[in-house]
Amino acid sequence: MDIFKLLSRATKPTGKSSALGAQTSRLPSAGSTSNPQLYHDSIPEPRGQKRKRNDASKDEKNPSPADEEFNFFATKADRESSAKRQAVEEDREAREQKQAGKEQYGAQQRAKDLDESECRQILRSHRLKVTLLPYRGLETTSSEKRKKPSKKPKAQDDARSKASEDPKQLYPQPLLAFGELQSTYGISKRLRENLAREGYKIPTEVQMGSLPLLLQPDIALGASIDDTDTLRSGAPINLLTVAPTGSGKTLAFLIPVVNSMIQRRRKSKSDESHRLEAVVIAPTRELASQIVNEGRKLVLGTGIKVVRMQKGMKVLEIGGKIDDSSSDINPSEEDESKEEGGSKATKTSKEPSQQPTAKADILVTTPLALLNTISSSHSNTKPTLPTVRHLVLDEADVLLDPLFREQTLGIWDACINPDLQVTLWSATMGSNIEALASSIIHSRQARLSPQTPAPIIRLVVGLKDSAIPNISHRLIYTATEPGKLLALRQLLHSSSTTTLRPPFLIFTQTIPRAIALHSELLYDIPPSAGGSSRLAVLHSDLSSTTRSAIMSRFRAGEIWILITTDLLSRGVDFRGINGVVNYDIPNSAAAYIHSVGRTVRAGWEGGVAVTFYTKEDIAFVKGVANVIAASERQAGKTPESGEAGGSRGEAEGLPKWLLDALPTPSKKDKKKLKMHGVEARRTGVAGKGKKMKDPKKSGRASMQISTKSGFERRLENRKRGAIEGSKRRKNLLVGDEDAAEDSEWSGFDE
């Protein structure tokens, strides 16, 4: 035994094992973070306290080499990476201590509101921007905007009209800790206990900005309420929120809805039966189920019931009673993904007396499911929901997209309560969606209650329409379709510490491609690790029971790799996802933002987003590359000064030459890609009355997900064709013999 090696041995593992352990501790699957906030900019010191020098903290930031544990056998690169990891850990501990101090300050010193300058500093440090959208009456239409005025208005009128059209910046009181919800904003004690039981202590950025506005706008807005007529009117505030994926939007819109119901029941002092007061619309069944699960955790002990809309369910209230006039035929619940684009055929359900009645206070539904129910209940009149006071559109950009717009607006029009509060939530929201929502809110308010204009506030967290900065993006060129499969297998079987590690999601463009990829990867996981049971495919053609079972197994950790379509790209929260693989290029920049947002949620770090693209995708990569570049700029990564990527020391920043070399697609190409995806990867199944194109001529033969070469596939096709031709000739010969026999005995009939 070498005595020098024994004496100089470090207590921590060295070499690859130490690097692997360090990376594993940073993965989202390693556990939750103590601070769910995404942005940790410098926060101003509390009022009345002067900043002092702290020599101890200075020494902590610059520790001496003697205090560190030294490894004699580690290389120079390992020592540098160890020092860097230690600095990151110390920085994280310092942020946690500062956040704890801020929480204590918010709980004890919040008796006196912050002034506007302090609110402005806190909001800027968390990258929150709150604006009051201008009120535009019905006289301002799109056709009038296009017309050029014949005469220029006067200077004063021009300045006045410009000031009225410009959005006003607001600086509301931020929520520094969940403890303020009861002391400052007066939420129910039971609701506060439910939040504490779930472990909510530090609010995320979207909760910090939205909860004060929705709970107590008078307290949150402060001085701003005296200067604006729309805010002084007392009408409910409508909120348009754009926040990154995984930032806690579900909790942000559920808390005000539950609290308002509890307060109304407390004032009326009535324990009447359940009454539908809130409707939450989500684009997919999986997202609706997730919202219901989160809502039921908040309403424990409050008497409020959260229900998900199901097939054949009655939810309408007419005159304070449940409507029992549902028809015998109830349409089935829609398959709510963008890949389907419609509902299934209607089926005959149970008799009206046997149908379930939803005694719901909060109804979570998909658009077509609720619209069909209220339309069938009001066969002769326009469907209405008079008792609904809260309408929540989760993933509002999809719900107001042409795919779901007619269904969503049908439910919106059915909510005829003048005090209806509308909130829209999404990680991506274009200006056209904002303009549409604003016009609907203003026109509806002018029709139902013209004396009280409806104020609309927009809340933006971080950089609008961009991915969160915690993700490590990788854009990989594979040249051809078989190259994608090789690159994916390299990620699965590589022993490098920087590779993608399970559990993770794989997104494909179509359902047949997801099924084909699943069949190709079935035997890539060794039997000792669980084999094919660790791999699953999820798409909208599966039954509701099968989809729920796969989701449960994936959440429980029984499934490591889940192959899916855009069905799970929005809103669904999987805790502990280490990464996302876009096997096919996303249909738009917004689709990329949502798909990669399934990892590093609620402040986690270490997630990886891998996107493959071939030579057929080069014309559509520019939008994804721009999102990656914006995300890396937020994280402080540049091509020249990026963080070290693995043991090779590569820069993580997207190369500038790649952005310059990629072509910019036209609006027509973007629209075509968004609606249909890459044409070459669409399924080769022809519709009714249409002749399927030759796959060789259309280029789809090279788009198949398979490890077999083209020569092997041609041999199989020839063999299959020869067998079918032999069977066809045999049937023809048998038919000729029967015909000959009939002609031989035909004389007996005479």
Image (tube, grey):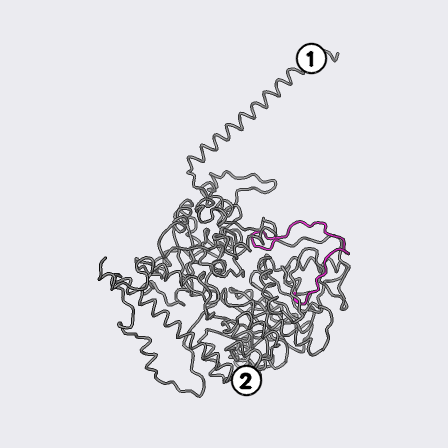
Residue 93 place in picture, x, y as percent: 40, 73
Kindly identify the residue that appears in the image at 54 percent across and 84 percent down.
223
How many labels sit on residues? 2
Q: Nearer the viewer, residue 746 or 443?
A: 746
What residue range appears in magenta? 335-362
Would you call the spot at circle 2 few (<14 residues within 10 Å), some (14-19), or many (20 or more)? some
Q: Is residue 359 magenta?
A: yes
The C terminus lies in quadrant = top right
Q: Amino acid at mark 1?
A: Trp
Residue 629 lies in quadrant: bottom left
Would you call the spot at circle 1 few (<14 residues within 10 Å), some (14-19), or many (20 or more)? few
Up the image or down, 543 lies above or below 576; here it is above
Residue 222 place in picture, x, y as percent: 55, 83
* Badge number at residue 430: none
**Mark 2 to mark 1: distance in Å?**
107 Å
Mark 2: which secondary structure? loop
Up the image or down, 529 lies above or below 473; here it is above
Residue 687 place in picture, x, y as percent: 59, 43
Residue denoted by label 1: 745
Q: Amino acid at mark 2?
A: Ala
Q: Main secondary structure of the magenta part?
A: loop
Q: Is residue 602 magenta?
A: no
Q: Is residue 91 visible?
A: yes
